Image (cartoon, grey):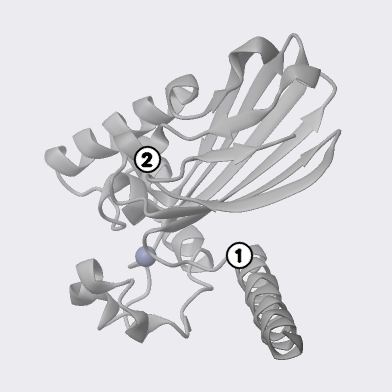
Amino acid sequence: MRRTLLALSVALSVSQSVLAEEHQHASLGAHEHGVASLNLVVDGSLVSLELDSPAANLVGFEHLPSNDEDRATVARVKAALEQADTLFSFTPAAGCTLQQVELESPLFAAHEDEDSDEHEHEHEHEHEHEHHDDHASGEHEQHDDHDDHHDHEHGEHADIEGRFDFNCSTPERLEALTLPLFNSFPAMQRIQVQAITTSGQHGAVLTADQPTLSLD
Ligand SMILES: [Zn+2]
């Protein structure tokens, strides 16, 4: 019995340190295909979500759109993100409605401002993520073609950041956040969610199979 408890406590402390590491990783702006981070903050009736995702998870590529097909894909993704109430869903009783969406990405900037070379610099700035330790872990299998060259070719990677503000008429009824987003974007494998609500902090890694975070 004693041994079981010891083993359990070792297992727990290992998993806690893994979580702490992952969290730190995410806050440093790690860029790992298939993985995104989402922060939720409740402030009175305002519920804000901040998503930070590799563009690959949403668009399917990360280069600047260079032809009509790419541009159409980017425009479609942008439009889908603007319909954020179909991607993020709250307890209906909380009465949350989408107020405002702000999106930022080199891919979107290029879309609006094709002739400028300003975005080259912006793009490199997005690239502070080169040394993933987990290249060999298999997360990148769909992107081997570009990850192989990843350290040499700048501008291969890009993020999409989104801020989604909801106004909730009864925020105290907010019991859960669900992410139908996984249905729209199958390349999105995991989202690390951190939530700060009146009941405290909540965190989870959500997936298509487990898309709901309890906020109780
Ligand atoms: Zn990338």
Residue at x-position 46% and y-position 79%:
130
Of residues 174 and 150, which is closer to you in this image? 174
Residue 19, compared with residue 213, is above or below; it is below
Q: What element carries label 2?
A: helix
Q: Residue 79: percent from the left, percent from the top? A: 36, 25
Kind of residue indicated by mark 2 = Phe
Q: Residue 205: percent from the left, percent from the top? A: 54, 55
Residue most extreme to the front: 1
Q: Quadrant of the N terminus?
A: bottom right
Question: In the image, which disc is placed on residue 182?
Answer: 2
Residue at x-position 51% and y-position 36%:
103
Q: Is mark 1 on a helix, strand or loop?
A: helix
Q: Residue 160: percent from the left, percent from the top? A: 46, 48
Kind of residue indicated by mark 1 = Ala
Residue at x-position 40% and y-position 35%:
181
Residue at x-position 71% and y-position 14%:
168
**Residue 125 vs residue 201: left or right?**
left
Of residues 132 and 209, which is closer to you in this image? 209
Number of labelled discs? 2
Question: In the image, which disc is placed on residue 26?
Answer: 1
Of residues 74 and 205, which is closer to you in this image? 205
Q: Quadrant of residue 75?
A: top left
